[in-house]
Image (spheres, grey):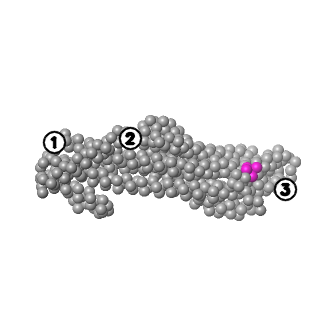
Amino acid sequence: MAKMMTALAIRAYRYALSGVAIVLLVSIFAGCASFREITAFASLSSSAAANNAVVKDYIGSIDRRKQYEPEKFHRELDAQKARREAQRASLDMLQQSVTAYMQALAGLTSGNARSNDESLEEFSERLNQVALLSDTEKDAAYALSTLLSRTVTSVYREHEVKKLIRDANQPLQEVLAATGRITGMDIVADLRGERALVERYYDNFMLAPGNPDEPVAMALAREARVRALDRVDSKIQATQSYQIVLGKVARGHQYLYEHVDRIGDHELDRHFQPYVDELEAAYREFVEVAM
Amino acid sequence: MVKLTAEEAFELGNRIRDAAVALHRWRIENRDRLSRSQWEELDNREVTLLNFASSNFTNGIGMRLDSSQISASRLEGSVKHAASAIEHIQSFKQVLDLASALALFAGAVASGNVAEIPAGIVALEDALSAIDHPNRPQDDE
């Protein structure tokens, strides 16, 4: 009976070693998948998409308009603000869908390395409790298991990342294009209207027929005009910068989609790095302008 | 009533805003020829036009939002898939634990010392228990 148990156990051990050998072969062919730049890209994209400064300003800009328009127009502005408030949930959803997707992509490319390593540390402790194996044998067994775990997880993860990028690219491009058009075209066009209102307000103050000639008041008004126009110009610049950021996210993801079969390659990671750098620079510029 | 597309609403808004700006420029350039009431009348027209342009942009954004709902829903589907893939990796870890425990057990048996086998059996049982009851804490922990 004891002999049969031992024979069965030895057979199980050989199967286990065969499994490790197969996985090692797979690892040799698959190489060690690299997602570093994709993770960085997804994290940056997620932060950029989560920034709702432009949307908040689009709704809040109606309150700014009130100070530049006669009171008789305020009811009309209130009605328009209510329409914009009603759009808020949809605008947020557009951004949140990109944020959630990018977070999921970052999670998939980076997420579980740590938990697998922790699991392997437990395995290492158990291994040390087996007194009969020499230190070299224990080290070898631990190294094999580390490779087994990392390789199998990595191969599975690579497959899922590829599938995700393939499936998500078209809706992502559409959502980014819609958000880009709303920010870069509609909201910028609306801010240009606000700029015209600011000019009108100060010109009325300074140039209306019959206004008393007050040089000090005029000088102050001229300064206030410049400041107010600068504020609107900064908002236009920030909104255009945000559109550029969204464009970089779209471009980067499109690159991944077009090279999806090479995802996990170190070489692809290296070629993808400039896209991540461009996105980072664009996002930094947006944050600087928007502050 | 003619229904505009998002692009048409955007174009119309731009043209109306530009018209308001042109009207303003004319008012400033010709201010010496205008009475106070004429000046104010034109000013009111400018504000009306600028608000109308703004309203067109708001309408255009509404139309773009309506047409992007399908893409956003599809993207959400991809997010759900990614989340389930991450969960799969977590349960995959349990299979790896089982494989590791099996290797440990087999290693103990192959070493020829039966005294080490119980430790291997405990490791195997722990791994199997974690798969059968993923939320139950381990007894030895």
Location of mark 3 (residue)? B37
User: Disc 2 marks which amino acid?
Assistant: Ala
> What subunit carries mark 3?
B
Nearest to the observer: residue A14 or residue B104: A14
Which portion, as a residue range, is magenta?
B11-15
Nearest to the observer: residue A4 or residue A147: A4
On the rendered image, what quadrant is the N terminus of chain B found in? bottom right
CA gap, disc 3 and disc 2: 80 Å
In terms of secondary structure, where does tag 2 sit? helix
User: Disc 3 marks which amino acid?
Assistant: Ser
Location of mark 1 (residue)? A134
- Comparing labels 3 and 1, the label whose residue is closer to the camera: 1
Please check whether the numbered discs 3 and 2 fall on a single chain: no
User: Disc 1 marks which amino acid?
Assistant: Ser
Task: Give residue A54's position: percent from left, percent from top.
Answer: 59, 51
Q: Is residue B12 magenta?
A: yes
Is residue B61 at all visible to an observer of this figure?
Answer: yes
Is residue A224 at all visible to an observer of this figure?
Answer: no
Location of mark 2 (residue)? A30
Task: Give residue A63's position: percent from left, percent from top.
Answer: 65, 58
Marks 3/1 in contact by CB < 8 Å: the verdict is no
Q: Please tell me which residue is depicted at 62% across the width and 54% down the height of the picture.
A: A58
Above or below, B49 against A237 in this view is: below
Q: Please tell me which residue is depicted at 76% across the width and 55% down the height of the picture.
A: B49
Q: Is residue B126 magenta?
A: no
> What subunit carries mark 1?
A
In terms of secondary structure, where does tag 3 sit? helix
Task: Give residue A139's position: percent from left, percent from top.
Answer: 22, 41
Question: Is tag 2's residue or tag 1's residue first in the polypeptide sequence?
Answer: 2
Q: Please tell me which residue is depicted at 65% across the width and 58% down the height of the picture.
A: B62
Instruction: Judge left or right: residue A206 versus residue B139.
Output: right
